[in-house]
Structure formats: C-alpha cells, structure tokens
C-alpha cells in the first residue's frame, strides 16, 4: 500500500542504485529512485512491559491517545517534535526503531507536570517520559543525561552519609559532567558568600566539607537503602533483559561516591 | 376478562412484556417462530452478559422460566402469524397452523438479525477458518470450550477484534451504529485475557462507543486491568500467509500502513433489522423506518407505538438495542398495550 504523500517519505528511505537490473530492465541511477516501505509488520509487545517496569512508566497501558499531554506540554510549545502522546503510542505498539529516531529529544522533558494534571486517564506522562529516557540510557542508546548524573551524585551522597552538602554535590556533578570548577558564576557566588555570610556559618560550611559528617546511626538506614536500590536495579535490568549493570555511574560503589 | 395481548417474539423484550402483563393479571399469547423461548441470547448461545456478567442461560433462562410456567401466558413456539386484521381492541390474528386468535392489542418484539460478515469478503470471514464473529466467540465461552482457533484448535497467541463490521458502512447500506458491539468487544477481550493471560488482544476501532456507564466498566477496565490494546485503524483487508492471518490497514495515529500477523481475527458484527421485517411490515401493516427497522410513531409521547394504532413495538425490533433496554421497553410496551385497548379503557372508566 504505497503512500505518495511527500511529507511521509523519509530521506533515508529513498534508495538509488548505481547498477541495478531487475528482470532485464535497467533501474540504475536517480531516475529510478525507490522508496523503501514504511509498513509496520509486527508489534513488539515487550517494549511496553520494559517501560512499565521502570519508575514512572507503570501506567502507560492506560493511554487512549487523546493528546492532552502533548497539548499541555511545555517543551512541545518550543519543539513540535517533542510529542509525548506519539512516543507513548510507539512504546505501546512496540515500534522501537521509530522511538529511537527521537532518542535525542525524549530526555528534554522538563518535568513541569502539566501533562500529569491534564491527563484524563492518570497515565502520568511525565513519568513515562522519565522512564523512557531512563530506558534509552539503560539500553545504551543515550549517554546519561546531566540530570541523571546529578540525581546520581545527589542520591549517592545521601545514601552514603544521610546528609547533603551542596558544595560536594556541585563538585561531584561538575566532575561527572566534565565541567571546570572555576565557573564565573560560581566564583562570583563564593566571593559574595565570603563577603556577607556570618563567620560562624562559614566555619560550619567549611568544616562540613572537610569532615563530611554523617547522620548518627546511619549505617542501618544505609544498608536498607542499598539493599532496596540493588533490588530495584536488578529487577529493572531483568525486565529490560540486561545481564550486566550499565558501564558507568550506577554501579560505582557507594563508599567511593562518599570519598 | 380482557382479550389477550399478542406478543410476537420470545426474546428479552417479549419475555419482559409477557411477564409484566401477567403480573397485573392480563392474559397474553406469546408467539415465537423458533422452537424455544429466549431470543438471541439463548438461540445464539451468548456467554456472560453486559453489564451483570451473568451467564445468558441463567439470566435469560430465568426470564423464560417465569413466563413459561405462568398460566396467564399462552406460549406458542415454532409458530408464526400469517394474517392480522381488525381494530384496536378487536384484532384477529391467523397463525401458521390456521388457528385464529381473538386479541386486544399486539406487541412486536421481533428483534434483530446478526450481520453476516460474508458481505465484507475483504475481511476474510468465510474464507479463512480462523476469522470468526463475536457471536462465535460467545459460543466458544458458553460451550465451555474456551477461545480456540477453529482451524486446528490451538490457543491463539494474538487476537484482533475488528469493530464496526456491518455497522457505520455506507458501502453495504448500514449507516447506523449497532450500539452494543464496542461494549461486547471490550467484554470479550477481557474474557480472552482472563482465559489466556499470554494472549495479546488488539481492538481495531474508528471510535469506541461504550456509551454511558459502560465507559469505565468496559473500555477503561479492559485497558487498565486487562491491558487490551486499542489501535485506531479501520482494517483494509485480512489475508493469510500460510501460517498466520495478516491484518492490513493504516494505523492512523502514526500515519503508517500496518500488516500485522494474528492467530485469530474476530468480527464485532452489528445488528441488522430482522430479515423478516418486510414480511412483518406487510402482515401487521406497520411502517419500517429508512434502515428497515420497525418505525416508532413517536419518540416522546407514546411509548412503543408503531404507525398502526393498537400495535406496539419493543426491543431491537426498533433498531440496535441492549438487552436491559429491551427489557425496559418490553415493560413499557406492555403498559402501552394495556392502555391502547379500548375495552380495557372502558373498563377502567
């Protein structure tokens, strides 16, 4: 069933052959351009289950494709290619290759949750976007996004010490994202802090950086959290058919993250 | 005693009308052309009914029992009406065995005929054994056999339900929505998922019309609890590749042609006017509306009235109707039939 709607033809589906003969007819060259079929020939039922196994994706099967999420979407207003409704559909029908075409924009969801509030079926599209972005990373289709790296630095510190020390979080984040420590805005901020902050508070902040205090009796909580996180990650890897943990970040021992 | 009311058709509407009349002491004659009462739910072997999920043989069977055992209802099965004449309060009906009935009023509860999808050959019914109708799936459940591919008896791994087969289709002169097929399909989809949890069920739709309270109980529930998938596409054709049925169409939400393999394809068949409606129209002198259903004289002021005074209509004879609405209309028409006979009116005054 050919469709000759020009907008539906993708450049990569246009095929020309330098030398091709079919049943005695020469079909070489530009004048015999072929359009490769875009026909969907099967549903991959595993894809929806994989996304549903990741946090946020649990309700994806509820979607009835009304488009409220895309209508409400902050990012869609700026980039019409950012279409949560469409991606949810691709995941549900298992059109994986089609989904991967948009792999570089799916993570751009700003988590404003407008979609969450308009969705009549409580799909939580924001969660689905998060799960899909996570899926792309776990499957190795995308490097970890800056926000994912930040989440990791942040949560690893909490797991390790039971506390958050902003300076260390920032340093860890810069390190993992390959950013220099001496950024103009940061230098300016520190200068102003030095100028205006009470001496006692500065000493506390400084000490916190050096001593790295931990919440008292944190070991028990930490063990429980670690166990839970490992359990969840193992469950997710299994659901996604991944034998080994991803190569960076997540498998780093918590102790090392605490430094 | 008043003259009996003639009730034509022993389905949900007719059974309901007969019972309503008997419950206030009014005699009726229930004429049914098949050899037993119950109508489509019994004759076609429906399984569990919407919305109560009771088995048809229990729910409708109960209605049959209370009518069949009632001395005020004269049940004539395997019987039809040949001639009908007279005025309200003084009708005469001649039956197929040439006996005559002296009756006051009549209620036509003649129901519908299932659409025969052989009229849509491109969808493979009658060509491929594993293309079946919703009625056949109902029978698979009600017989206790469960859903199997008729070709070799295997359990299907993937089932497609095509909606609007014989409905909303000008090509075959059926411009109406058959009203029940969406809900029935949701119900069947859930039952398949319940029986065969590894079987994926896809419903191909143009619109989902599980009207009123069926929205969440059927449409939402089938998606949310049973993970039935809905694809917005009207299927172009069903073919066979030697192993699987191939469903072709356009997935309109992604603007993409699809050719998907399936084990079993189910046609959600619509409700046609009863094939006997032309005959009934001429015998009883009632008009049909443009689709061939028995025309109602008034939508608001006269419940169940036809174009002929003293002859009333209820249930799917007027157009696609649900079982519970048919039952309500049966009672409504029984009331109208009582009020419509002058003799009864005179007695009341």
Image (tube, coloured by chain):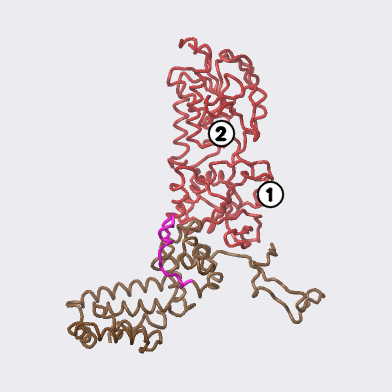
Chain colours: A brown, B red
**Quarter of the rendering containing residue A129:** bottom left
Give the crowd class for mark 1: few <14, some 14-19, many >=20 residues within 10 Å.
few
Task: Say which residue appears at 63% left-offset and 44% top-offset.
Answer: B166
Location of residue A131 with respect to B55 vertically, above or below: below
Q: Residue furthest right?
A: A24
Q: CA distance from mark 2 to mark 1?
A: 26 Å
In front: A71, or A156? A71
**Mark 2, chain letter?**
B
- Which of the 4 quarters of the picture holds residue A164? bottom left
Residue A69: image location, x then y, percent: 47, 61
Query: What type of secondary structure mainly makes up the magenta span?
Result: loop
Residue A91 horizontal/vertical position (percent): 50, 65
Q: Are marks 2 and 1 on the same chain?
A: yes
Is B338 situated left or right of B285 in this image?
left
Give the numbered dot on residue B121. Answer: 1
Q: Residues within 10 Å of mark 2 (few under 14, many from 20)?
A: many
Query: Which is more toward the observer, A172 or B162?
Result: A172
Using the image, name the chain to which the residue with label 1 belongs.
Answer: B
Left or right of residue A259: residue A150: right
Q: Which label number is shown at residue B316?
A: 2
Q: Nearer the viewer, mark 2 or mark 1?
A: 2
Q: Which residues are magenta?
A: A106-123
SS for tag 2?
Answer: helix
Judged from the image, the secondary structure of the residue bearing numbered disc 1 is helix
- Asked if the stretch drawn in magenta spans residue B60, the answer is no
Q: Nearer the viewer, residue A111 or A124?
A: A111
The residue positioned 48% from the left and 11% from the top of the image is: B1
Q: Which mark is first along the chain, 1 or 2? A: 1
Image coordinates of residue B66 in percent, x first then y, are 44, 26
């Amino acid at each position: 069933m050919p469709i000759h709607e020009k907008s539906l033809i993708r450049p990569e589906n246009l095929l020309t052959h330098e030398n091709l003969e079919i049943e005695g007819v020469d079909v070489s060259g530009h004048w015999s351009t072929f359009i490769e079929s875009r026909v969907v020939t099967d549903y991959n039922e595993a894809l929806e289950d994989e996304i549903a196994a990741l946090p946020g994706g649990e309700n994806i099967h509820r979607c009835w494709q009304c488009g409220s999420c895309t209508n409400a979407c902050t990012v869609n207003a700026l980039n019409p290619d950012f279409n949560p409704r469409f991606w949810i559909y691709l995941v549900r029908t298992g059109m994986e290759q089609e989904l991967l075409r948009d792999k570089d924009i799916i993570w751009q969801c700003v988590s404003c949750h407008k979609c969450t509030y308009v969705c009549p079926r409580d799909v939580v599209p924001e969660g689905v976007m998060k799960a899909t972005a996570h899926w792309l990373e776990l499957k190795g289709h995308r490097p970890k996004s800056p926000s994912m790296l930040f989440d990791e630095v942040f949560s690893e510190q909490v797991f390790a010490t039971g506390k958050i020390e902003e300076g260390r979080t920032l340093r860890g984040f810069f390190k993992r994202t390959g950013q220099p420590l001496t950024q103009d805005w940061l230098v300016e901020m520190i200068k102003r802090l030095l100028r205006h902050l009470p001496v006692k508070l500065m000493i506390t902040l400084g000490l916190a950086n050096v001593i790295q205090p931990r919440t008292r009796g944190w070991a028990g909580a930490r063990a429980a959290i670690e166990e839970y996180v490992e359990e969840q990650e193992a469950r997710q890897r299994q659901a996604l058919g991944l034998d080994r943990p991803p190569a960076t970040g997540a498998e780093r021992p918590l102790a090392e993250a605490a430094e | 005693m008043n003259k009996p009311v003639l009730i034509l058709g022993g389905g949900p509407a007719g059974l309901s009308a007969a019972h309503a009349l008997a419950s206030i002491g009014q005699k009726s004659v229930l004429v049914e052309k098949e050899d037993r009462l119950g109508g489509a739910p019994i004759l076609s072997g429906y399984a569990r009914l919407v919305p109560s999920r009771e088995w048809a043989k229990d729910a409708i069977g109960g209605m049959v029992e209370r009518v069949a055992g009632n001395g005020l209802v004269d049940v004539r099965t395997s019987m039809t009406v040949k001639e009908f004449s007279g005025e309200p309060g003084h009708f005469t009906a001649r039956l197929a065995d040439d006996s005559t009935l002296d009756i006051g009023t009549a209620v036509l509860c003649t129901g519908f005929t299932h659409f025969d999808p052989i009229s849509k050959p491109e969808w493979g019914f009658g060509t491929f054994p594993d293309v079946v109708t919703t009625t056949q799936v109902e029978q698979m459940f009600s017989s206790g056999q469960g859903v199997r591919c008729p070709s070799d008896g295997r359990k299907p791994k993937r089932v497609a339900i095509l909606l609007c087969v014989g409905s909303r289709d000008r090509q075959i002169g059926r411009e109406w929505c058959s009203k029940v097929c969406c809900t029935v399909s949701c119900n069947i989809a859930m039952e398949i998922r319940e029986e065969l949890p590894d079987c994926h069920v896809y419903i191909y739709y143009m619109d989902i019309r599980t009207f009123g309270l069926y929205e969440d109980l059927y449409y939402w529930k089938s998606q949310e609890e049973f993970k039935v998938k809905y694809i917005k596409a009207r299927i172009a054709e069903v073919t066979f590749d030697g192993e699987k049925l191939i469903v072709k169409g356009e997935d309109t939400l992604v603007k993409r042609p699809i050719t998907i393999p399936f084990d079993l394809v189910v046609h959600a068949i619509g409700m046609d006017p009863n094939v006997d409606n032309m005959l009934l129209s001429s015998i009883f002198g009632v008009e049909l509306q443009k689709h061939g259903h028995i025309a109602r004289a008034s939508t608001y002021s006269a419940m169940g009235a036809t174009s002929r005074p003293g002859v009333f209509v209820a249930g799917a004879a007027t157009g696609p109707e649900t079982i519970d609405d048919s039952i309500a209309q049966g009672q409504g028409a029984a009331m109208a039939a009582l009020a419509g006979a002058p003799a009864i009116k005179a007695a009341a005054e």
